Image (cartoon, coloured by chain):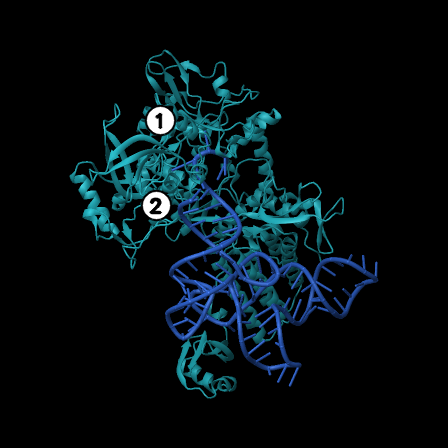
Amino acid sequence: MARYNPKEAEPRWRAAWAAADVFRTRSPEEARGKPKAYVLEMFPYPSGRIHMGHVRNYTMGDVVARSKRAQGFNVLHPMGWDAFGMPAENAAMERGVHPKGWTYDNIAAMRTQLQALGLSIDWSREFATCDPEYYGRQQAWFLELYRRGLVYRKEATVNWDPVDHTVLSNEQVIDGRGWRSGALVEKKKLTQWFLRITDYADRLIDGLKTLEGHWPDKVRLMQENWIGRSKGLRFTFRFAATPPKGFDGIEVYTTRPDTLFGASFVGIAADHPLAAHLAVGNPQIAAFIAECRQGGTSEAEIEGGEKKGLFTGIEVTHPFDPTQSLQVWIANFVLMDYGTGAIFGCPAHDQRDLDFARKYGLAVKPVVLPPNADAQTFAVGDEAYVGPGRIYHSGFLDGLEIEEAKAAAIARIEEQEQGEGATVYRLRDWGVSRQRYWGCPIPIIHCPKCGPVAVPGDELPVILPDDVSFDTPGNPLLRHPTWKHTTCPGCGDPGERETDTLDTFVDSSWYFARFTDPTAIRPVDKAAADYWLPVDQYIGGVEHAVLHLLYARFVTRALADDGMLSVEEPFAGLFTQGMVTHETYKSPLNGQWLSPAEVELRDGRWVDVELGQPVDVGGIEKMSKSKKNTVAPEDIFETYGVDAARLFVLSDSPPERDVQWTETGVEGSWRLVNRIWAEVDKTADDSESTGSEDEVRALRRAAHKLIQGVTEAVANFRFNAGIAQFYAFLNTLKTLEAVKGAERVAALKALILLINPITPHLAEACWERLGFEGMVVDAAWPNFDPVLAADDMLVLPIQVNGKRRHEISAPPGASEEAVREIALADAAVMRHLEGLTVRKVIVVKDRIVNIVAT
RNA sequence: GCCCAGGUGGCGGAAUGGUAGACGCGCUGGCUUCAGGUGCCAGUGACUUAACGGUCGUGGAGGUUCGAAUCCUCUCCUGGGCACCA
């Protein structure tokens, strides 16, 4: 008996697939009427090495792709590289390598590693977003959107490092300081390029409904909340005294016009034009604005920070009560990007307003009375009341419910011609400018006479220059001696190229469309895209639930409006998978993190391999370099083979949840691989058929239950539950050792076909050992027969008053009366019914009996 | 601060409102082995009982139901996202 040797078998079968070119995508003509299935996993950033998260993601995709292939679909399953981004520039600064060389070297290394996974990918369609053939087409459609007015420039705030004189990403701001210089970060305004995603806000929300049942509910909900459509009131406060020069009033937006009588102040953003105006000649205001400018731009930082404000000395008149005036404050929690950059504060019914009012001693006046509360005694303490109720203390709104009051308040403001009902979105336009080198150049030329001018189509792509230096911080394109100097396509005068590059989210917002024909002259070949899109199953990390997926949905619509695509939704099905985690280890001596390779378990305690000293075992966290809790996939492949690793990443946790990597877990998967091989190896040499009729039936039943269970599990992304059934099947097989020959081979054939998408190398080896023709990769998915899978007898638990007391056997489909009679006649049940009167007997067919007795 | 998700044995987890703990890991005992490992057999939620059995048990507190891990309300804890990380 030969042991299974993955080191020999796995490369051999990968070579066999390659030789037969089985994973080449078939054209619609070649597919001859087969339905298409486009299976895609989020393409990786080429960091240099694959990690376990990749193994999990791409294995899941491969299971879907291979099972679809077996089920008769024409499959597109491509791979590429999300290759622009900051890490390449960081490597350039730290190690003096060129971002381009670094990136393509990493791609080569990772391609080798991914190919070792035995994925059913059509590598002929591979591309990287940093290929000029790709980003040049991106520039082409970007200019198409520019012509249609979907691209524009405006001022926006960035994190500014005042020492390095560079823009920082939110990630590069650590505790309010630049990660390299350590300087306190400031907000700075820059003119930047934007895409009008807000024009599509309604369509992006409405489209979510069409994805119901095909996308996780939580992702749809997160996107809906992110877009944040709200109906409310936009109106103008008039100044109580002489207006400041150039200002008619302060326009605010509110979703709670019903609480207007509870207003106790007006807040404006620190970068509101009125604030800037007032700062002139008022050092106190100027200083406060400067103070607000400190710190980064991230929402978490702004919203989580301390609330600060300054009274401007100006007052406005309440729109419903001219005798009442409200103080205007500059407040750091008011965002210029949302609504109008100004709010009215109603402390009683908004927590942030309440915190602010308590801090600065402003009035707190409740105007919504909770149900059953007493108007005389109801008061707001440290917690704002945001629940339902009736309006009071509010003049003409008194007695109305909240929604009625909103409508009445809006109507009155419109009557007064002070404003109108409005729909506002939390979603902001997409800022795509990055002051960085390693990205797609924005194909615009700035001309002193003509302004920004699009680069003519025949001059695309605008190629990144290779001769750049990273010895000083900042954007090398800006410093490049010649690259930006060109002529204006409009007037022929000297002009300058835009030196900003595009956000890498732009690169990943359309790559799935490019995969349908990566050689197309246009950005997308219409016929190929029409055949393949939408992506039938998209798989990736839940961390992309909002940004990447929203941008891709937007760009798809924008390109569809341009006639380039015919679908609105790029991803018909979405699955978001959890992360791979691992225990963390820390040395108690120096507080340094230790990698799993540096520790081992001795007598139930984790110790440092070298020193033999005990180590502190920390939390289970996402595998990351900083915590050193990573496991290199190559090491696992080397020890257990690729199939055992594929099996393990799917087996221990539901795929949407985090999975904890453990050495003992992968050993369990390795054992399953060996058990399957041993079973096949043993059966292959059986020549005669044996086994009683009952045993043969039991084996068939087990096999058909397996087909049913695994087919459902794979279709519903319940890989862990599916894999458990393989174990259960093998356990059953062991109890049926007496069955040999053709019946056993047939059962194993089903097993091989079912496990093929998960452990394809092993499946091929078993297929060959049993002497079947061709390769499993070309074999059809097995069919399930419900008659063969049905049980002869069922065990029905009997409950008395909801507590399980006994069980009876009954054939499937036994009638209610028959089951009731058996149950009531059961000795153990009768014992529990002693002294009680049976009131009711509930029989749930083929499931349970519950006797209610008192 | 805001949005979202998840809490079930020693561990990962299973369970169309219907036998809680499938399956795996670990552990215990036995067989195999010079030994270690592998492999094979049996057991394994807690408490209780000589045994049959009984009681409790799905983060916590209430509720709906003949019946709740599952549905509802409140609460605690952990994780993800927050627009320049990809």
**Residue B64 lies in quadrant:** bottom left
Is residue A689 visible in the rendered structure shown here? Answer: no
Q: Which chain shows up in blue?
A: B
State whether residue A512 is above or below residue A801.
Answer: above
Identify which amino acid the numbered label 2 is placed on. Answer: Asp
Calculate the distance from the C-alpha at mark 2 to the C-alpha at mark 1. Answer: 31 Å
- Classify 10 Å Cα crowding around label 2: few (below 14), some (14-19), many (20 and above): some
* Chain label for disc 2: A
Tag nearer the camera, 2 or 1: 2
- In the rendered image, residue A714, in percent from the top left (x then y), is placed at 49, 56
- Residue A350, labelled with which disc? 2
- In the rendered image, residue A498, in percent from the top left (x then y), is placed at 42, 21
**Residues behind callouts 2 and 1 on a single chain:** yes
Is residue A557 visible in the rendered structure shown here? Answer: yes
* Chain label for disc 1: A
Which residue is located at x 54 percent, y 42 percent?
Answer: A21
Which residue is located at x 59 percent, y 44 percent?
Answer: A623
Q: Colour of chain A?
A: cyan
- Classify 10 Å Cα crowding around label 1: few (below 14), some (14-19), many (20 and above): few
Identify which amino acid the numbered label 1 is placed on. Answer: Lys
For the N terminus of chain A, the image quarter is bottom right
Earlier-in-chain disc, 2 versus 1: 1
Q: What residue would you read off at disc 1? A: A154
| Name of the residue lying farthest toward the bottom | A835
- In the rendered image, residue A633, in percent from the top left (x then y), is placed at 62, 44
